[in-house]
Image (cartoon, rainbow, N blue to C red):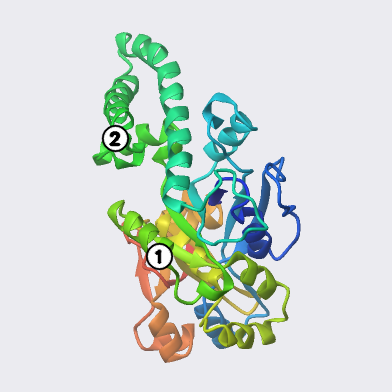
């Protein structure tokens, strides 16, 4: 099960610099002119989790394999992207394939780096991006309605459900609100997801600031944070330039470098964790002499769902899950001692996986 986040923004806001730092590569060209990224760059990054080291030490694991998120660096959008301005149509299609969208907003002044709008205003920039995505969604819905109406007349219940959802989404879009603002009941969530609406995806705001503002933020980041809160999401403050430098340093030097700047951790860790939370994910572990491995699963997932993340056969032939809570595994000193203490549980198909569970699946196919 893969999860990916699209990095979007206007040209010259630091998207590719951020992507380079995230993936610790220079795969994405970072240059001071629009559309320097022609194809979407894709990179996978490990989700930081200090629990893995503790589990691996106790289990005597040879390897540690973290769970990962995929990031897609999508070239800069401009006004009119929904109508094909710049390289808009291609980029909008790339965004459609992602699970969540990260809006990178420029919150720094630098006369040497041009801004496509001529001034710094992250809220305006966010509005431009959102409007282009909403216009694209409106066009997409208009194209779907006729076909869905024909199916609905033929008795297709899913088509009827989607038509009802489309009516509500159109009301929101006409009012200048994204599709994700529409309140859905549990039965509507699946047909809504199948519409693949750009503004239906969860969104995170990333405030790219100067080195001087990396630790405290600035007036612009305060405004972005207020907007994020009003929308029920988050904002993260980073300096893409600093993160790019940190990514090139040996791990032993990174902490000292960040400390000198008044930072307790890399901003990238905050972005990855925020993305993980935005997608509604949590982690369970498998551990043994060969490896300790982290696996991502949706919050609220049941034991067979978690088994299926490892292999479809595990889910298809699920019998039970031997489960130890992380705190019990670490406190007691591993599987054998947890079993002796009665902390290893046999869980069935209805068990809801908890974050940090150390699991072993029994199956038969």
Up-down relation of residue 303 to residue 262 (above or below): above
Is residue 353 or residue 175 the one in the foreground? 175
Residue 249 can be seen in this image: yes
Between 120 and 18, the one lying in front of the other is 120
**Residue at (36, 38) in percent of width and height:** 178
Residue at 46% across, 52% down: 121
Disc with the residue nearer the chain's start (1 vs 2): 2
Q: Residue 247: x percent and y percent?
A: 68, 72
Within 10 Å of the Cα at label 1, are there few (<14), some (14-19), or many (20+) other Cα atoms? few
**Quick check: 304 above or below 239?**
above
Q: Which residue is mark 2?
A: 188
- 57 to 140, vertically: above or below: below
Q: Is residue 240 above or below residue 250?
A: above
Judge by depth and name the residue closer to the eye, 3 or 105. Answer: 105
Residue 29 location, x and y as percent?
A: 75, 52
Residue of label 1: 219
């Amino acid at each position: 099960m893969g999860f990916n986040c699209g990095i979007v923004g206007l040209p010259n806001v630091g998207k590719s610099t951020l992507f380079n730092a995230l993936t610790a590569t220079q795969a994405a060209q970072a240059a001071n002119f629009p559309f320097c990224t022609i194809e979407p760059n894709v990179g996978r990054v490990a989700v930081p989790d200090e629990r893995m080291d503790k589990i691996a030490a106790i289990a005597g694991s040879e390897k540690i394999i973290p769970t990962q998120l995929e990031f897609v660096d999508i070239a800069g959008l401009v006004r009119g992207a929904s109508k094909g301005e710049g390289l808009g149509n291609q980029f909008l299609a790339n965004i459609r394939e992602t699970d969540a969208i990260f809006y990178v907003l420029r919150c720094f002044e630098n006369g040497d780096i041009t801004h496509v709008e001529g001034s710094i205003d992250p809220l305006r920039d966010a509005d431009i991006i959102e409007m282009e995505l909403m216009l694209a969604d409106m066009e997409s819905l208009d194209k779907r309605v006729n076909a869905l109406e024909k199916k609905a007349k033929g008795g297709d219940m899913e088509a009827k459900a989607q038509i009802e959802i489309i009516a509500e989404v159109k009301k929101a879009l006409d009012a200048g609100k994204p599709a994700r603002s529409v309140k859905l009941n549990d039965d509507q969530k699946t047909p809504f997801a199948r519409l693949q609406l750009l503004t239906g995806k969860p969104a995170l705001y990333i405030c790219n600031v100067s080195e001087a503002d990396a630790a405290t933020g600035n007036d612009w980041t305060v405004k972005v944070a207020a907007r994020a809160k009003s929308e029920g999401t988050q904002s993260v403050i980073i300096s893409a330039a600093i993160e790019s430098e940190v990514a090139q340093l040996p791990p032993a030097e990174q902490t000292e470098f960040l400390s000198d700047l008044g930072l307790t951790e890399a901003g990238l860790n905050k972005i990855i964790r925020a993305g993980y939370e935005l997608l509604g994910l949590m982690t369970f572990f498998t551990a043994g002499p060969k490896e300790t491995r982290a696996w991502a699963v949706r919050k609220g997932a049941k034991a067979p769902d978690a088994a299926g993340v490892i292999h479809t056969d595990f889910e298809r032939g699920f019998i039970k899950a031997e489960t130890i809570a992380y705190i019990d595994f670490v406190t007691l000193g591993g599987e054998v001692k947890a079993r002796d203490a009665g902390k290893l549980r046999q869980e069935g198909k209805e068990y809801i996986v908890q974050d940090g569970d150390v699991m072993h699946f029994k199956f038969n196919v």
